[in-house]
Image (cartoon, helix red, strand yellow):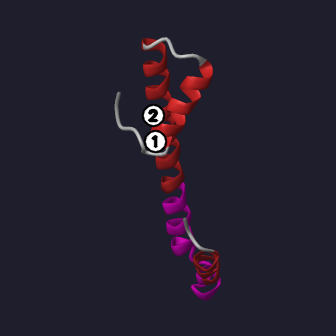
Amino acid sequence: MASASAFYRAIQSVRQRDMDLTAWLEFFVTGLATQLEEVQASGAAAIRADVVARAHGLNSRQGAVLAELFSAGRLDSV
């Protein structure tokens, strides 16, 4: 996660470099890529948990616990 100081440095660089947005865009794209990776990992964990829960006839509460374990990286496969 990017710090507030990194954010302000990226914004300040735009002013210091005669409105050159390069540093800000690099900051933004890096943050966006990080967020997309987190969403992808979370989605993959939810799908894995759903597949396992259905295969083993787990109820919704058990499936939710399984999803949390996959999401937290405490469980790789079943």
30 on left or right of 24:
left
5 on left or right of 40:
right
Is residue 75 visible in the rendered image? The answer is yes
Contact between labelled residues 2 and 1, with CB atoms less than 8 Å apart? yes
Is 23 contained in the magenta span?
Answer: yes
Q: Which residue is mark 2?
A: 44
Residue at 40 percent of width and 38 percent of height: 75
Q: Which residue is mark 1?
A: 41
| Residue 14 x %, y % | 61, 79
Residue closer to the observer: 23 or 7: 7
Q: Residues within 10 Å of mark 2 (few under 14, many from 20)?
A: some
The span shown in magenta is: 13-32
Under tag 1, what secondary structure? helix
Q: Main secondary structure of the magenta part?
A: helix
| Residue 49 x %, y % | 47, 27
| Residue 42 x %, y % | 51, 40
15 on left or right of 34:
right
Under tag 2, what secondary structure? helix
Residue at 49 percent of width and 62 percent of height: 30
Residue closer to the observer: 16 or 60: 60
Q: Amino acid at mark 1?
A: Ala
Q: Amino acid at mark 2?
A: Ala
| Residue 65 x %, y % | 55, 32
Is 28 contained in the magenta span?
Answer: yes
Considering the image in quadrants, where does the C terminus appear? top left
Residue at 60 percent of width and 82 percent of height: 9
